[in-house]
Amino acid sequence: MLDPLLMLITVFVGAFGACMGSFLNVCIYRLPREQSVVSPGSHCPHCQTPIPWYLNLPVVTWLLLRGRCRFCRGPIAPRYLLVELLTAVLFLAVLFQFEAYPRLLGMQTLADPLLLPIYMAIIGGLIVGTFVDFEFMEIPDQVTLGGTVAGLACSILVPALHGHGVLQDPHPYWQRALVSLGHGAGAAALGAGILWGVGWLGEKSFKKEAMGLGDVKLLAAVGAFLGWQAVLFTIVGGALLGSIVGVALMAARRVEMQGHIPFGPYLSIATLTWLYWGPVLWQWYLRLLTP
Ligand SMILES: [Zn+2]
């Protein structure tokens, strides 16, 4: 059983996740339209009426108003509710990676509490990138390039991100920070390099753009935050998942053979899988190689 303090933290993180999901919804709507994400405040997309704070509660408002604007009754997309719930669930899943909680679904354990906010930031970026990619077939530079810069900064600030935390590595902080930055920068270059190479080959073979530059930049961010194993896993996992879904959609005749399927969402799902199960999967894979 969870003790009362842990229950309080759990409720807080869940509510925080829903609030952040509400902010991510703003980013998903405004970043591709090149609008500021801070001002003006939330307003209805139909009648432009500003939404007061008591009607802007994540999850609750959407359910109470049954997905309609309070003022003009215009429909508010289910995506708003979905993103708020999804963010809350994914934030809670990171919390459950800490020792104090019961092991959930074989997820890897996290020792350094500083990883909690970093993982939350990664989740936020992936959610924004995914939903914008579905709608606009592109991933905002704020997510991909911004993510790469943030990933390198976090590599320096929290060397535990690349396995050089105080618990694993006795060297002084500045040494761990340098090695960690090297890991992040190397993995960012590897991720961008592989996807750019695949895109270049695709363009040569099919005489049309095969890989969006957004996916190339997204992989740089994944590498900067999570390292080279995450890069390889994300590319292989994303390609597998994308092919399965692509073939299924073609079989169901939902898309044309030549139709464009966004790759970003599948890369994001693979990265998320790595976030929760990465080292566990890596150990399993290494054991497969050494019978
Ligand atoms: Zn309205």
Image (cartoon, rainbow, N blue to C red):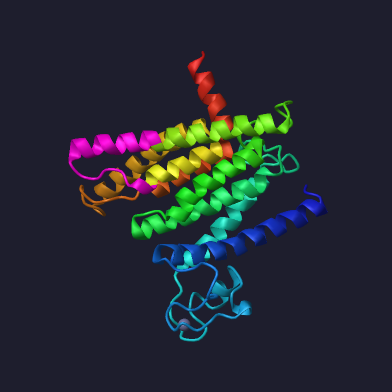
The residue closer to the viewer here, 109 or 291, is: 109
Above or below, comparing residue 83 to residue 242 in the picture: below
Instruction: Indicate yes or no whether the magenta region holds residue 274.
Output: no
Q: Please identify the residue farthest to the top as the structure is shown.
A: 291
Q: Position of residue 267 (x, y in %)?
A: 42, 43
**Residue at horizontal 41 percent and vertical 45 percent from the top:** 217
**Residue at horizontal 49 percent and vertical 54 percent from the top:** 127
Q: Is residue 17 left or right of residue 127?
A: right
Above or below, comparing residue 179 to residue 40 in the picture: above
Q: Is residue 94 left or right of residue 33?
A: right
The residue closer to the viewer here, 32 or 240, is: 32
**Residue at horizontal 58 percent and vertical 40 percent from the top:** 276
Q: Please identify the residue farthest to the bottom as the structure is shown.
A: 71
**Residue at horizontal 55 percent and vertical 69 percent from the top:** 38
Q: Please identify the residue farthest to the left as the structure is shown.
A: 207
- Name the magenta segment's main secondary structure: helix
Q: In this figure, what is the number of numbered marks?
A: 0
Is residue 118 among the parts visible in the rendering?
Answer: yes
Q: Is residue 152 left or right of residue 244?
A: right
Q: Position of residue 52 (x, y in %)?
A: 60, 81
Residue 51 found in image quarter: bottom right
Instruction: Indicate yes or no whether the magenta region holds residue 194.
Output: yes
Q: Position of residue 238 (x, y in %)?
A: 40, 40
Q: Which residues are magenta?
A: 193-214
Above or below, comparing residue 244 to residue 131 in the picture: above
The residue closer to the viewer here, 169 or 176, is: 176
Q: Position of residue 130 (x, y in %)?
A: 43, 53
The residue closer to the viewer here, 78 or 131, is: 131
Is residue 230 among the parts visible in the rendering?
Answer: no
